Structure formats: structure tokens, C-alpha cells
Image (spheres, grey):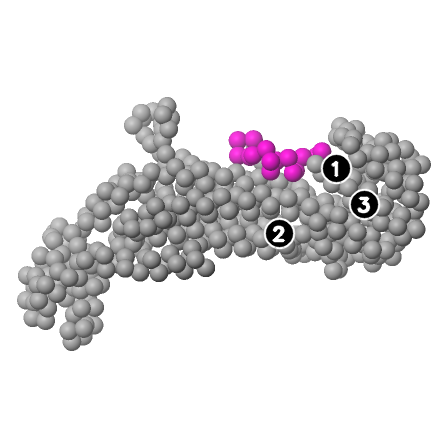
Amino acid sequence: MIERYSRPEMVSIWSSAAKFRIWYEIEAHACDAQAKLGVIPQANADAVWKAKDIDFDVERINEIEAVTKHDVIAFLTHLSEIVGSDEARFVHQGMTSSDVLDTAFNVQLTKAADILITDIIKLLAALKRRAFEHKDTIRIGRSHAIHAEPITMGLTFARFYAEMDRNLSRMRAARAEIATGAISGAVGTFANIDPAVETHVCEKLGLVPEPISTQIIPRDRHAAFFATLGVIASSIENISIEIRHMQRTEVLEAEEFFSKGQKGSSAMPHKRNPVLTENLTGLSRLVRMCVIPAMENVALWHERDISHSSVERNIGPDATITLDFALFRLTSVIDKLVIYPENMIANMNKFKGLIHSQRVLLALTQKGVSREDSYNLVQQNAMRVWEQGADFLTELKADPDVMKVMTVEEIEDKFDLEYHTKHVGTIFKRIFEN
């Protein structure tokens, strides 16, 4: 994570101060539960809450850890300095480090998920607005980057909306899957701590108890979470690639907003580059980079090892902070994207009617010509447009084999653009009214 690609709200979740605050809440709530069970005195549980409004000294904890070489012990030692060693002697009763680390990590991930869900909702609003704004703005559809048949710019935005709406569902499901906690003690048997403690702590933290946690929360949950972030990042890149294509000089159907005073190149003053969507393509790669390590964290030795720990200390902040920034940036790009309908029409007409070839092909088959012969008739006329710059409609009218079975009026009818957009409303209803 670097400051350039981060936003404060998400960054704050991963600060050391925020982490230690969650650790403290886990320990304090566990003490409350232990007191209710009669395992520890209520007075000791109450004493732990003396630290409720105190900022933990991160430097002091780091200083202790430099000696203990154990972060949880360092934190507990500092907590006892605040609360008093006698009062704090029941803190962490029957617990193991993973109870604190894993439960806290999942709290952080759920908080991060809440921000990402809000980000996606805002992006969806921008995509929906632009979809309806350009519902009937005709542009050429492309396959293999080559002109295919007409679509509308609204359909392009609607397609991205539908994709991001699926991502919203995925993100909500990923949040639900990761929102578990474990206070089950060494190797997860509850031998030294009552399961009621876990239930109490999870309830207070907005989690559900992990059904079976060994000594750690199973990492298939985390793999699914980070895989979801990777899918969302891929969708961001998908949208970004389309915008980058549209901004190419020879296309210029849309471009990123270019603000007053903005510079595109240190060498060429004329440049207006798609720097934001290029940046988003790169950020998407960074998020996906975290997916494979998360997958590899699933396979751990026996009831636990810590090979996952160093990975998660990196990918937890990096993936969520980067994705949050990318979603925010993409929303701004969509909101401000400049659309050029005139260029869309000009591009579509560049090859003089070729985009209507399928309609002519189908019309010939309806007239009794075999599909193979119909294809050959249309293609030979189309190739003259490609190779000689001819006009497709003119070529068809001059072809005696075509004119044997079709009238001029029937051929011209196949060049109606509105034919291609007659079901746009149906598609919009499927996407925006379900």
C-alpha cells in the first residue's frame, strides 16, 4: 500500500492502533463472558474495561515485542501495565493467540467489505445514470476488435452495470463468509474455555462463531474473500479496457475528462491520454496478485502453522485499500466520461454499410437461397467494400444474383439502423427492473 493509491477510511482499518483496539475488545468481552460463567471474578473483568478510553501505546508494544518476539504477548503485557498486573491476571484465560489474531483479522475484513460494498453501490449508480443517458446512442459493436453490428452506448454501460451488480452480490456473500470468529483455545477443542465465551465475543463483534476452528479459522473462507476481490478487480479492468479503446485517436468515441491545466505529456503538448483507466488496469493486477497467496494459505499443517500470517499481514491491507481506491477512481471516471455520439456514427459508417451483412444474408435464405450460397453472395460483395472502398448497398444492387431474388426496396430495408436497437428496452428492463 502506498499513499498515492489509498483513501483514509480504508487505511484506518489497518492501522496498528485500530488492530490493538480490536484485540482489546476481544479480550475484554471474553473476560465479561468468563465472569458470567464464574470462571473469573467480576471485579477483574470490570477492571479490564479501565482501558476502554485509553489509546494503546504502539511504540511501547513494539518495544516489548522486540524482547518477547511475540506480538500478542507484547500487547497483553502492555494491557497489564495499564490495568494493573493483578487485575489483568485473568486476561486471555484459556485462549490462544489465534483466537485474538484470527477474530480480529476477520473483523477488519468485514469492516473493509462494508466500505467496498458502499463503493460498488456508488459505482452502480454512476453506471445506471450513464446507461439511461445513452440508452439510444448508437455505436458499433465489435468482436475481435472488428466492426460487427450496431449496439448503443447505453447497452455498454448496462452491461457493465449488470457485471458490477453481480459483484455486489459476490461481495456481500464474501462478507458473510468471512464474518466468523473463534475463541476455542489451543487446537480448537474448547478444553480450557467454554464455548459460551466464543458466542458472547462474536455477538459483541458482529460475527458468528466458527463451527470448527482447529486452532485457526479455516483459510478457505479467506481464499473465497480474496478471490472475490480479484473478480471485482477484473471487472474494473474490463471497463477500463473498453474506455481505453474508445479513447484511441482513431476511435475517439469517448474519453476521460481532461481538466483545465491538465497535461498529457512532458514532451508532446497535444496529448490527452487515458491515464486513469490505464492506472486502473495496473491496480487491478495488484489486487489479483493477492489471490494466489490467499489460495495457498488454505493448506496449513495439522491444527495450525503460521505460514499464512506474513501473507495476510500484506494482502489484507494491500488488496482492500487498492480495490477501494480503484472503485472510487472508476466511479469518478464513469461520472465524468465524455461521450462523442457523432464519432460513433462516423466510425460505424466507415465501411459503408458492411454492418448490415447479416440481415442481407438472412433475407436471401428467406427467399429460398441456400445458406452457403447466400453467405458467398454477401461475402463477395463485402470484400469489395473492404478492398476497394466500395459502397455495400451499391454493390448489392448491382449484383444480378442478388437482384434475382430481392427487390431494391427489400435490400434497402435491411440497412435500417433502428432494427438493431428494437429490443434495447427489453434488455434494460431485465437489468434495471429485476
* Label 2 residue SS: helix
Callout 3 crowding tier (Cα within 10 Å): few <14, some 14–19, many ≥20: many
Give the mark toward the camera: 2 or 1.
2
Q: Residue at x 51, y 46 (%)?
A: 120
Which amino acid, mark 2?
A: Arg
Which amino acid, mark 1?
A: Phe
Callout 1 crowding tier (Cα within 10 Å): few <14, some 14–19, many ≥20: many
Which amino acid, mark 3?
A: His
Instruction: Give the magenta part as a residue range.
Output: 3-17
Residue holding disc 2: 175
Q: CA distance from mark 3 to mark 2?
A: 23 Å
Q: Is residue 157 left or right of residue 7?
A: left
Residue 218: image location, x then y, percent: 70, 56
* Label 1 residue SS: helix
User: Is the magenta region chiefly helix, strand or loop?
Assistant: helix
Residue holding disc 1: 20
**Of label 1 and label 3, which has the lower sequence position?**
1
* Label 3 residue SS: helix
